[in-house]
Amino acid sequence: MKIKDFDVPEALLYTKEHEWARVEGEVVVVGITDYAAKTLNDIVYVSLPSSGQILQQLASFGTVESIKAVSELYSPCSGTVRRINSGLSTHPELVNQSPYGDGWLVEISSDNFEVEKKKLLNAAEYAKYLDSLK
């Protein structure tokens, strides 16, 4: 689905802070949305947590820096960081080029995602939210 020239994949869940979540087996893969990547413009640095770090749903877990601004990253779920996208340390531009693919941020092992996902937006809800932004 596209809204205002931004891709909003149907199979993902979203936060109002513009992170996405995708369940892959026993992990939740997290990244920032196409809207966030395009709004931030040229991303030059990504600060991510360490593997093993415990995250809380909708709490900050890192930052994304662009030539325009520094933005906090918020976890769509609680859990333990299983893996980070280490490629972003040398190629942060992957977040701009492929926010739903090679630009993913972290994988989280979450024991409570089935309950926590109720606080997230589906694609239609996120698209409606984007449409409401000025």
Image: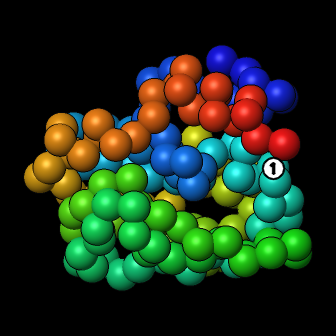
Residue 51 lies in quadrant: bottom left
Task: Name the kind of residue labelled 1 in the image.
Answer: Lys
- Residue 31 vs residue 101, the one in the foreground: 31
- Between 44 and 131, the residue placed more toward the observer is 131
Q: Secondary structure at mark 1?
A: helix
**Image quadrant occupied by the C terminus:** top right
Q: Residue 44 in the image: state x and y as whole percent.
A: 77, 75
Tell me, yes or no, if residue 27 can be seen here. Answer: yes
> In the rendering, at what x and y percent does residue 48 appear?
49, 76
Q: Which residue is mark 1?
A: 38
Q: Residues within 10 Å of mark 1 (few under 14, many from 20)?
A: some
Residue 121 rendering spot, x and y as whole percentages: 45, 34
* Outermost residue, left side: 111
Is residue 102 visible to us here?
no
- Residue drawn at x 49%, y 41% as measured from the top left: 14
Lateral position of residue 93 relative to residue 47, left or right: right
In the picture, residue 114 is in which quadrant? top left
Left or right: residue 63 versus residue 53 is right
Q: What colouring method underlies this structural image?
A: rainbow
Name the quadrant of the N terminus.
top right
Q: Considering only vertical position in the picture, is 39 above or below 83?
A: above
Residue at horizontal 39 percent and vertical 69 percent from the top: 59
* Residue drawn at 85 percent across, 64 percent down: 42
Instruction: Tell me where residue 91 sits by quadrant.
Output: bottom right
Residue 102 location (% of width, % of height): 59, 49
How many labels sit on residues? 1
Residue at 45% across / 28% down in the picture?
122
